[in-house]
Amino acid sequence: MAAASLIGLDDLVDNPTARVAISLCLDCSYSMSGAPIGELNSGVASFYKAINDDEIARFSAEVSIVTFGPAQKETDFQTVATQPHAPVLQASGDTPLGEAVQLSLDLLEQRKQEYKDNGIDYYQPWLVLMTDGQPTGSSAVLSAQISRVQQLANGRKLVVFPIGIGDGADMSTLNRFAPGGRPAFKLQGLNFQSFFSWLSASVSRVSQSTPGDGVELDAAGIQSWATFKL
C-alpha cells in the first residue's frame, strides 16, 4: 500500500472527526497551458490555505485531486492537517473526462468504505468537475459515469459541481452531470480564486454542522464566480 494511503488510514485512527471528502477532478489538458493552469494552481493553493487556517475544517476536510489528461490521481484523500500543500499541476495531453470522473468516484467509494470500516461519520462527499474543452476518451465510459453521478446525486450521496472554463467548454456534456435539471456552471473568465474561496467557505460551513443535516449553499457567493445564477 502506498505511503499516502497508510497516512490516510492512520489519520482515521488518530483523528475521529467526522469527514467531508472533496474530490477535485480538474482538466489539465494541453489547452489549459499558460494563464489557465497558472490561475488554477493559484486557486487550488488558496483553497488548501483557507482550509488549513480553519481550526475545524483542517481536521475534517479531506481533499483528493484527479487530473486529466491523462486521467491520473495527484493526491489521495487526506486532511489538510496531514497534507497542507497543494500539488503543482502541469498541463498536457487530451481530455478523457469520463475516465477521470470514474477514477474520482472510485476513490470516493474507497474512502467512504474506509470511513465505515473505522467508525468515522462523514458528510455528503463533494465532486468538483472543471473542464475547458470537449471530452475525449471512451463515450461509453463517459455515459456510464454521467449515469453514476446522477444516481449518487439524486440519492443525496454526492454534491456535484460541473464547471466549464472558457468558450471551448462542452457545456452540453457538463449539463448532463448537473442534478435536478439545473444547468452546469460557467466560470467567469479565469476566476478560480473566487470559486475556491467560495468552496473553502462552504466546506467550513459543512464541517461545523452535524452529519446528515442539510446545509444550504451560499447562492449569493456562487454569483461571484459563476455566470449561471441560482
Image: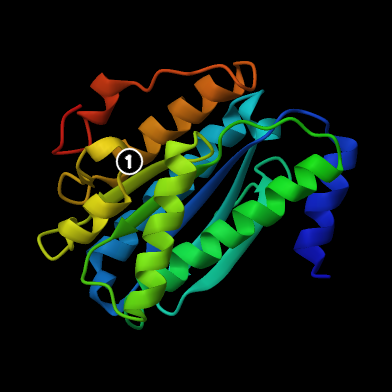
Q: Number of callouts in the render?
A: 1
Left or right, 179 with reference to 226: right
Query: x, y percentage for residue 132?
Result: 23, 64
Which kind of residue does numbered mark 1 sit on?
Answer: Pro
Q: Residues within 10 Å of mark 1 (few under 14, many from 20)?
A: many
Q: Is residue 91 visible?
A: no
- Is 198 rendered above or below residue 210? below
Q: Is residue 167 visible?
A: yes
206 or 79, which is in the foreground? 206
73 or 145, which is in the foreground? 145
Query: x, y percentage for residue 150?
Result: 39, 48
Q: Residue at x 9, y 60 (%)?
A: 167
Residue at numbered disc 1: 179
- Is 56 rendered above or below residue 104? above
- Is 39 rendered above or below residue 50? below
118 or 165, which is in the foreground? 118
Quadrant of residue 58 within the rendered picture: top right
Q: Residue at x 20, y 28 (%)?
A: 223
**Quadrant where the image shows the N terminus:** bottom right
Left or right, 210 with reference to 147: right
**Quadrant where the image shows the C terminus:** top left
Q: Residue at x 58, y 54 (%)?
A: 64
- Identify the secondary structure beneath mark 1: helix
Furthest residue in direction left, as rendered: 167
Query: x, y percentage for residue 57?
Result: 62, 29
Quadrant of residue 122 within the rendered picture: top right
The image's colour scheme reads rainbow
Left or right, 193 with reference to 100: left
168 or 201, which is in the foreground? 168
Query: x, y percentage for residue 9?
Result: 83, 51
Left or right, 185 with reference to 205: left
